[in-house]
Amino acid sequence: MAQFVRNLAEKAPELVNAAVTYSKPRLATFWHYAKVELVLPTPAEIPTAIQSLKKIVKSAQTGSFKQLTVKEALLNGLVATEVWMWFYVSEIIDKRGIIGYDV
């Protein structure tokens, strides 16, 4: 056991350097996209979002969603799934654990 701890202590700086080298370009890419995609909507974008929501409701009422192409329907399904998953993730974070959920 002592040998294992000694070897780990000797290799720790090398492992940390390798982890930093590996993660730097990936974190740079993440931050690049996060600055664009995770920004709150501006006041100018809110009316556009309201119009989009009205269009979705009208589409559901009139049945025009049946005229979507497969690509559009798949994209809409993926967006809905993403929103649904973010809801569950926020619930888990809020509850501070998965305990209490039927998983």
Image (cartoon, rainbow, N blue to C red):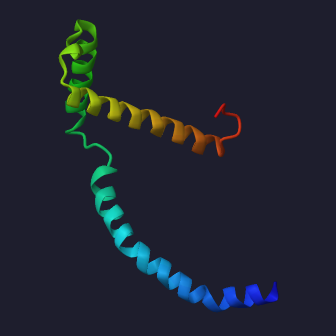
| Residue 17 in sight here | yes
Q: Is residue 94 left or right of residue 61?
A: right
Q: Is residue 20 left or right of residue 37?
A: right
Residue 54 position in % (x across, y down): 24, 19
Q: In percent of the image, x 42 and y 76: which residue is there?
A: 22
Q: Is residue 98 above or below residue 68?
A: below
Q: Is residue 56 above or below residue 102?
A: above
Query: Where is residue 2, by image quadrant?
Result: bottom right
Query: Where is residue 64, by image quadrant?
Result: top left
Quadrant in the picture for the N terminus: bottom right
Q: Is residue 77 above or below residue 82?
A: above
> How many discs appear?
0
Quadrant in the picture for the C terminus: top right
Task: Please state which of residues 84 and 22 is positioned toward the viewer in this rendering.
Answer: 22
Q: In percent of the image, x 52 and y 41: which residue is there?
A: 90
| Residue 47 in sight here | no
Q: In percent of the image, x 75 and y 85: which residue is there?
A: 4
Q: In percent of the image, x 33 and y 69: which residue is there?
A: 28
Residue 40 position in % (x across, y down): 32, 46
Name the outermost residue toward the top. 62
Residue 35 position in % (x across, y down): 30, 58
Q: Is residue 103 left or right of residue 30?
A: right
